Image: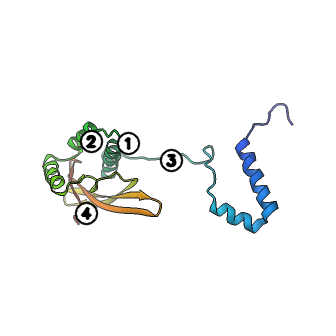
Amino acid sequence: MNMKFPARRRPARRAAVAAGLALAVGLGVSTQMSAQASVPAPAAASTAAPQSVSGTFGQAVTRVADFYGAYIDAKGDGTDPDVTLAAALRRHYLTPDFAERLAAWEEKNATDGILRAQNIPARWSVTDNGTVGNGHEVIITLTYGSGETTQKTRLFVLLERYDHIADIATTSAR
């Protein structure tokens, strides 16, 4: 052992190597491969690439992603949703005309018109769909549930030329 660079202790790595060695010796290499495929590997925080999200000021996709991310966080904050924040986000991002139409739709359908559901999605993605008239259309895909029981909802969000949401629909305005 070099005294200038003392060995670092890595108990998790040692345990993983020991377990792999025991499987290889005790069960054979082919069994080891199938056993490793069926058991999820432990999360290695030091080797995983950090997640990155980027956006551009004034870009339609970024604006819709910002709105939906903040709105879902406000609505889905465990047992204590932030109703005040959700309402403020609506006032900031929606056109007044659309906010009125959305409120009427929500009253008629007894569901959240932004999410088109009564619950909160587990995941979402936002994709640019290009210009439509004087506005811009963005597709948001909301994924509800987890594992094998997931359901996806695809919404088309129309931004007016001043970057306020003017409509949310289940079909494209194209």
Q: Which of marks 3 and 1 is in front?
A: 1
Precedes in sequence: disc 3 or disc 1: 3
Considering every residue shown, the one lying at the far right of the view is 1
Label disc, if present, on residue 78 of the rendered structure: 1
Label 4 neighbourhood size at 10 Å, few (<14), some (14-19), many (20+)?
few
Q: Under tag 2, what secondary structure?
A: helix
Eyeballing the image, is 4 above or below 160? above
Label 2 neighbourhood size at 10 Å, few (<14), some (14-19), many (20+)?
some
Residue located 33% across and 61% down the image: 153
Q: Do the residues labelled 1 and 4 touch (CB within 8 Å)?
A: no
Q: Mark 3 points at which residue?
A: 51
C-alpha gap between disc 1 and disc 4: 27 Å
Q: Residue 117 in the image: x percent, y percent?
A: 28, 56
Precedes in sequence: disc 1 or disc 4: 1
Task: State left or right for residue 8 relative to residue 130.
Answer: right
Precedes in sequence: disc 1 or disc 2: 1
Task: State left or right for residue 158 relative to residue 108.
Answer: right
Q: Mark 4 points at which residue?
A: 170
Considering every residue shown, the one lying at the far top of the view is 4
Residue kind at label 4, given as amino acid type = Thr
Eyeballing the image, is 86 above or below 34? above
Q: Nearer the viewer, mark 3 or mark 4?
A: 4
Q: Under tag 4, what secondary structure?
A: loop
Residue located 62% across and 43% down the image: 46
Residue kind at label 2, given as amino acid type = Ala
Precedes in sequence: disc 2 or disc 4: 2
